[in-house]
Image (cartoon, rainbow, N blue to C red):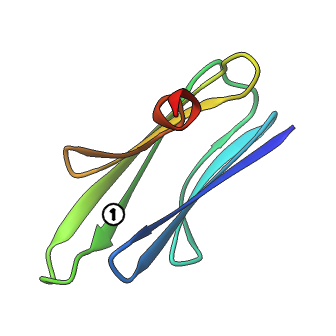
Amino acid sequence: MRNVWKLKYGSHSIQVENTWMSDKLYVDGVLQDEQVGFHLSSRLLGKLQNDDGEFEDIKVSLAPGCPNTRARIFIGEQLMYSTDLQWDM
């Protein structure tokens, strides 16, 4: 099984990939963090430079769910994407 989430943030593209054996975080096509091996949950960390030239933290939480993996993507302290919100709509 493979899940991919894509998010635009300003001029940046964020992509999270989840498979049975790895989780990866890409910012503008560059790999910033990777968890290798089978995990019941995963946390990925990265950074991006905003339009003001300041660096912001990216935090991704992944957890198995039924029927799909659940993902939450934060930039700074703000929740930018959640599969929970997508499924409730």
| Residue drawn at x 33%, y 63% as measured from the top left | 47
| Residue drawn at x 62%, y 52% as measured from the top left | 24
* Residue situated in front as seen by the camera: 67 or 25: 67
* Residue situated in front as seen by the camera: 46 or 77: 77
Pick the quarter of the image with the N terminus.
top right
Q: Where is residue 25 in the image (x, y as percent from the top left)?
A: 55, 56
Q: Where is residue 62 in the image (x, y as percent from the top left)?
A: 55, 32
* Residue situated in front as seen by the camera: 68 or 18: 68
| Residue drawn at x 76%, y 21% as measured from the top left | 67
Q: How crowded is mark 1: few (under 14 residues within 10 Å), some or many (20 or more)?
A: some
Q: In this view, does 64 lie above or below 35?
A: above
- Seen as rendered, the residue at the extreme front is 89
Taking the image as shown, residue 72 lies to the left or right of residue 50, namely right
Q: Where is residue 54 in the image (x, y as percent from the top left)?
A: 14, 75
| Residue drawn at x 81%, y 33% as measured from the top left | 20
Q: Is residue 68 above or below residue 79?
A: above
Q: Is mark 1 on a helix, strand or loop?
A: strand
* Residue situated in front as seen by the camera: 13 or 23: 13
Q: In this view, does 26 lie above or below 58?
A: below
Taking the image as shown, residue 60 lies to the left or right of residue 78, namely right
Residue 69 location, quadrant: top right
Residue to which mark 1 is pinned: 47
